[in-house]
Structures are given as C-alpha cells and as structure tokens.
Amino acid sequence: MIMEQPINGFLANPRHSEKENLNQYWYSAHTIDAMRLECEDGSTRIAFLSTPSIFFSLKNKELKKNSVLFDLDEQWSNLKNFVRYDFNQPTEFPAELHHTFDMVVIDPPFITREVWEKFTETTKVLLAPGGKILASTIQENAPMMKELLDVNPSVFFPSIPHLVYQYCFYVNYTSPRLSEKNPEIPDDE
C-alpha cells in the first residue's frame, strides 16, 4: 500500500544518509512518527540505543534535552547528550547514567543472539525499575526477545524501506498505538 509520508527533518537532511558500513537503515517517516509518539507518550528520559532517527525526530524539547543518544556514529559526538556506544563494550559509559531512564529504545545493527545479549546488558544497566522497552528486530527472534528482555511482539510492524527483511517491534508494556497494524506493511508480511 502506498501512503503519503509525513515530512521528517531527520530523513530530509542529506548529512543523515544511511551508512551501510555501520548497518544503518532508517525507518520510514510514518514509522518514525509512530515511534516518536510512542516515546513522547509519558516518558521523561529515554536512552536511544542505535536509534538516531527517533532521537532527532522528537518534538518534545524537554524530553529530547533529558534523553541520551547512544551510538557508534561519531557524526553526533558534538551533542551534549551523545554517548559513544560500542555494543562490544556494553557497559562502558558513565556510571551516573545507570538506572536513570524510564524508557530504552533499541535497534541494534545486527540481529544475532550475541549482539542482542550485549544490548540486553546495556538496557538492564540503563533502565530504571519499571521502565519501558521498545525494541526492533526480526519476527524469528521473538522467543529470544522474550527470554532476554521479557518483551512481546506488537501488531505494528515498522517500515524500513532499504532493508530486505521485515522487522517487528517488541515491547514490555501495553501500547494502543502499537496494537494497530501499520498501513505501510502489506497483509502478507
């Protein structure tokens, strides 16, 4: 189904082109907007793990100021709330960030168990008790995601135009927004 995409400043900026060497593939503008709304719905401080498109798309200025982008891509290193993040050193970041986020948004560059175990370690160190998790990976990883992060697949699937396989969102909370089908995704997915 072809649908009109909202304008997204992050996607429109030529400096933010996808980098295959970092396995960066951006969500569609519609998916980014759905994720942004999900993040802005009650969260006060979010850790964005390898999700710059969502961090930069936040419209809630206070939330953006209080949140932190954890990423390997140094193009954002000039930001005050940027932490260089290499999942191979999953807890190498300042201790004052431990257990201070009420939400963690995760989209690793790889879908393997080994990588997800490292992102899980990071998430558990960053997330405050009772915090929300919004993660993105393939459907086949559902049992592993349940085991590692106690998250469940959502009905809303993200659109990632330059990725050849379909991803799924996983959450540890109830979300009316993510309980509805994404109109961008064909019914056969």
Image: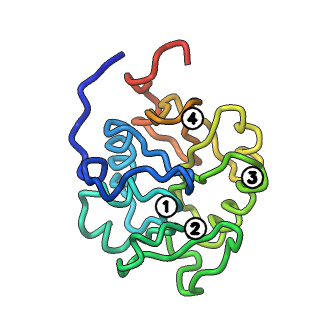
Q: CA distance from mark 1 to mark 4?
A: 20 Å
Q: Which residue is mark 1?
A: 103
Query: Which residue type does callout 3 highlight?
Result: Leu
Specify which label sits upstream in the sequence, 3 or 1: 1
Dot 4 falls on a residue whose secondary structure is strand
Q: Which quarter of the rendering shows the C terminus?
A: top right
Location of residue 75 in the rendering, given as x and y in whole percent from the top left corner: 40, 70
Residue 163 horizontal side relative to residue 8, left or right: right
Q: Does the residue at mark 3 contact the one at mark 4 (Cβ under 8 Å)?
A: no
Q: Which residue is mark 3?
A: 148
Q: Which residue is mark 4?
A: 167
Dot 3 falls on a residue whose secondary structure is helix
Specify which label sits upstream in the sequence, 3 or 4: 3
Specify which label sits upstream in the sequence, 2 or 4: 2
Q: Which residue is mark 2?
A: 127
Q: Nearer the viewer, mark 3 or mark 4?
A: 4
- Residue 164, by quadrant, is top right
What's the residue at 51%, 41% (across, down)? 174
What's the residue at 70%, 37% (across, down)? 142
Q: CA distance from mark 2 to mark 1?
A: 7 Å
Q: Does the residue at mark 2 contact the one at mark 3 (Cβ under 8 Å)?
A: no
